[in-house]
Image (tube, rainbow, N blue to C red):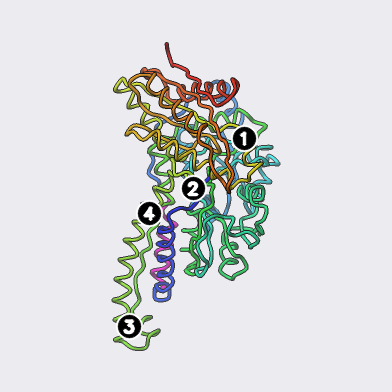
Amino acid sequence: MNDRFAPHKSLALACLERTFVAVMLACTSPTSIAAETSEVRGAVSIGIVSDNKPRFSVEQQQWLDQRNRTLTYCIDNDWMPLEGLDSSGTHTGLSAEALRLFSERADIQFKLVQTKSWRASLAAAKERHCDLLTLAMHTPERGQYTNFTTPYLHVPNIILGRIEAPFIESIGDLRNQRVGLVRGYAFSELLEYRYPELQSVEVEDETEGLKRLQNNDLDGYITTLATAMYHMQELGLADIKVIGRIPMDWSLSVATRSDEPILLEIMQKLVDSLTPEERQNFESYWRNIKIEQSVDYRVVWQILGIALFGASLLFYWNRKLNRVNRQLEIANAALARLSVTDDLTQLGNRSYFDREFRKSFQWCQRNRNGFAVAMVDADLFKGINDSYGHEAGDHCLKALAEKMRHHFRRETDRLARFGGEEFVIFTTFQTAKEIVERLDKFRNAVADGPTVWDGRDIKLTVSIGLATGVPEPDDSPAHFLRLADQALYAAKQNGRNRLEVRAIRD
């Protein structure tokens, strides 16, 4: 999923926060730092009620019984607050809470297989020493030996730099510079394919990457927003800031060994059992980290040497801290918006679709209104990327999204980028003829208006698959989406640049 970090204002706020924390760290007592770190480490409980038990088939129950209802798993030891090991070697973090929830729901025991690093965990999964990876992102290479459930957590992917580094518009601004990434992480494989001009530098873990960035051994460091917030606070790294956002978020799933397909079915049922509230609690687990520090007046006096100046500086700092906390609240709100927005097109992303699609469907179901979902796919888009380059392709996608916004701006219209060059539109309607006419008008506008890039006209067309109907109590949103996808496939097969319609019932 393509994202570009649009609102530089929120980046500037993050920079201001870290700059101010650098001053406050010098004047913070060791007791208060220890207390704060302990508070962050202690935020383990998500507070989820585990009463949504999945129903396993007889074959799945037998498979579990043959293994004494015990599954082994591997983790990343240094990826807090998402997952890690505490000082006693106990699995902690968000993934530990997810496994606790799954264990209560399905009467399954999860046994940790400890490894030295994330790379070692991947090797253990490949060699069948563990059954699961608790938080993993799909890549072509991993797909050769693991299967993946649908993602249950989405985390923004960011670039860190030193405090003096400029903000960047895109990752391409770092070409020919040293960019660090933990060895074995999914984006190492994906970025090497998409941005071969980057000087990728692999590090063993998050702590090493941050320290090398601080020591100027790296020009940038790619990580998640969640783990960056945690480690920067834990290590007291105040001279590092967020300088940009990677145009791809972490979509994290449970990875299962590919030679046990029944295991994938079991874990998928457990992931499907998560309620929207539980998924939101997972998102809140890593996002709600606040910075609160107390000031030690004796240190201020020692540093400044003048009592009057120290008191004045303390007053100024207190006012500044209040302002930073207010700005942090604004930044958190902006992050909440970013987490459901595709920054390339400014449409909703998959998280937005997952949240809004079911809500819109259920509203139509309750009120007996017509519900329509259209899958929109840019025709032969790979040829545009191959002929004109990825930047031209991104420009075409932004132009396509703008036309989509122009034609679908009613209060009940919802637009999202489904992935790559595929989009989805879902809305209510009074008559099926009305929504068909709106979609055909949009399709013709795309075909009749070429996109201009670097002085050249790029012709773009779209194929659309539409599913319509009034949802009955037994209908599901997945059924509507599946019909729309079938209609899109028919549109592609029947010549492209056309609209195919499927009614739920005649």
- The stretch in magenta equals 30-45
Q: Is the residue 7 above or below the residue 53 in the image?
A: below
Q: CA distance from mark 1 to mark 4?
A: 34 Å
Alpha-carbon neighbours of circle 4 within 10 Å: few (<14), some, or many (≥20)?
A: some
Q: Amino acid at mark 1?
A: Asn
Q: Amino acid at mark 2?
A: Val
Q: Is residue 479 visible?
A: yes
* Rendered residue at 38%/56% (across/down): 331
Mark seen at residue 332:
4
* Rendered residue at 52%/59% (across/down): 168
Q: Nearer the viewer, residue 375 or 208?
A: 375
The residue that disc 2 covers is 155
Which of marks 4 and 2 precedes in the sequence? 2
Which of marks 2 and 3 precedes in the sequence? 2
Q: x, y (%) of residue 351?
A: 45, 40
Mark closer to the observer (4, 3): 4
Q: Is residue 177 left or right of residue 416?
A: right
The C terminus: image quadrant: top left
Residue sticking out furthest to the bottom: 306
Q: Amino acid at mark 4?
A: Asn
Alpha-carbon neighbours of circle 2 within 10 Å: few (<14), some, or many (≥20)?
A: many
Label pair 3/2, CB-CB below 8 angstroms = no
Q: Nearer the viewer, residue 232 or 493?
A: 493
SS assignment at label 4:
helix
Q: Amino acid at mark 3?
A: Gly
The residue that disc 1 covers is 147
Q: Is residue 79 magenta?
A: no
